[in-house]
Amino acid sequence: MRTLSELSAGDRGRVTRVGGDADAARRLMEMGLMRGTTVEVIRRAPLGDPLEVRVRGFMLTLRRTEAEHIEVE
């Protein structure tokens, strides 16, 4: 499995697991990053942090540490 932080701009993936501590995982799921959701990486900052993704038709900016807890296929 790969994490969302490993995807490049233009790549898509389907969320298979949201990990991390309970509060962080709940926060990510409240933002729409639930299992089965398709995510597309739109762009990354020059040093790779943060990254902008499209989820359920809206744009979301995540820190790399947050994206490392989201497994995709």
Image (spheres, grey):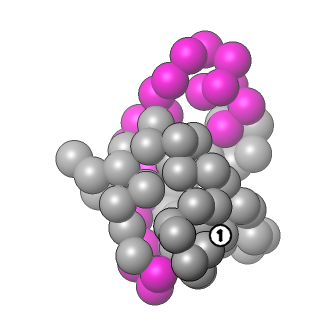
Residue bearing mark 1: 52
Q: x and y percent of residue 17 in the render? A: 41, 36
Q: Mark 1 belongs to which amino acid?
A: Glu
Q: Residue furthest front?
A: 47
SS class of the residue under badge 1? strand
Residue at image coords 73%, 31%: 27
Q: Is residue 29 visible?
A: yes
Q: x and y percent of residue 60 in the render? A: 73, 62
Residue 55, quarter of the rendered image: bottom right
Q: Nearer the viewer, residue 44 or 24?
A: 44
Answer whether residue 24 is magenta in the image: yes
Answer whether residue 15 is magenta in the image: yes
Q: Nearer the viewer, residue 46 or 5?
A: 46
Image position of 1 (left or right of 4): left
Q: Nearer the viewer, residue 17 or 46?
A: 46
Find the magenta span and give its range.
9-28
* Residue 53 drawn above or below residue 23: below
Residue at image coords 77%, 70%: 58
Q: Nearer the viewer, residue 16 or 10?
A: 10
Q: x and y percent of residue 43 in the render? A: 58, 80
Quadrant of the rendering where the C terminus is positioned:
bottom left
Q: x and y percent of residue 26 in the render? A: 68, 25
Image position of 16 (left or right of 39): left
